[in-house]
Amino acid sequence: MVAEALRGIDLDPCADPLKRVPAKSHFTLSDNGLEQAWEGSVYINPPFSNTADWVRHLSLYWEAGKISAAIALLPVMALCNKSAQHLVKYNASGITLLERVLVFLDEDYKEMKVRLPFPCALVYLGKEPLHFLETTRPYGVPCLVSQSILGRHRSTLCTYCGKPFLAQRSTAKYCSSTCRIQMYRKMAK
């Protein structure tokens, strides 16, 4: 269903060791997807114990124009967290609140007996929200998200390290003080 909604998956940055998501590229735990560059169409099912870092990484690469479309599987409660507010307010174009209780697999790929005690949602970033909503309609309640104009933050690439970051000023060139200092040291040589 996700592959159909995205019209193919280029990257699964949170892949399990058997890489069961039908993506062209996978980052497993040993690859550390948070340390890698993301591009193309992305499906992300982040560890629910730490959705904040993954959502932030997704937003940065989306706003930098590296990601063409993405779907994130997140707990509904995470959508209201401070870490996901930017994603939901400025990047998402559709959300499907999943009706069914999801069943996850254990490390032996057997169905876990314990079900999630909370509902989940699929969050869509892309230019085809109506296709996403129609594709996911059988699995939950589809919701179109009003597109907000990105406020004072904009995504840009760090001049020193090349990683995307949210700039608070239009003249920002570096993602951190460390990169700014390293660049000045490099220029002084």
Image (cartoon, rainbow, N blue to C red):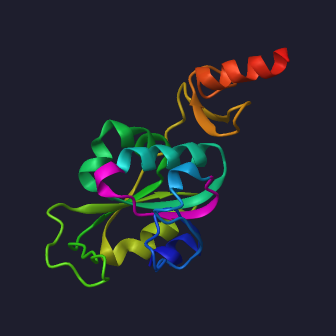
Q: Quadrant of the C terminus?
A: top right
Residue 146, given in percent of the width and then of the height, sits at 44, 46
Q: Residue furthest front?
A: 189
Q: Which corner quadrant of the image does residue 153 belong to? A: top right
Q: Is residue 125 left or right of residue 107?
A: right
Is 72 placed above or below 132 here?
above
Is 11 placed above or below 174 here?
below
Q: Is residue 22 visible?
A: yes
Residue at 40% from the left image edge and 63% from the top image edge: 45
Residue 170, given in percent of the width and then of the height, sits at 66, 21
Residue 76, given in percent of the width and then of the height, sits at 26, 54
Q: Quadrant of the N terminus?
A: bottom left
Q: Does the magenta portion include 135?
A: no
Which residues make up the magenta segment? 37-50
Residue 23, given in percent of the width and then of the height, sits at 56, 75
Pick whichever, 26 or 138, lies toward us: 26
Residue at 29% from the left image edge and 48% from the top image edge: 78
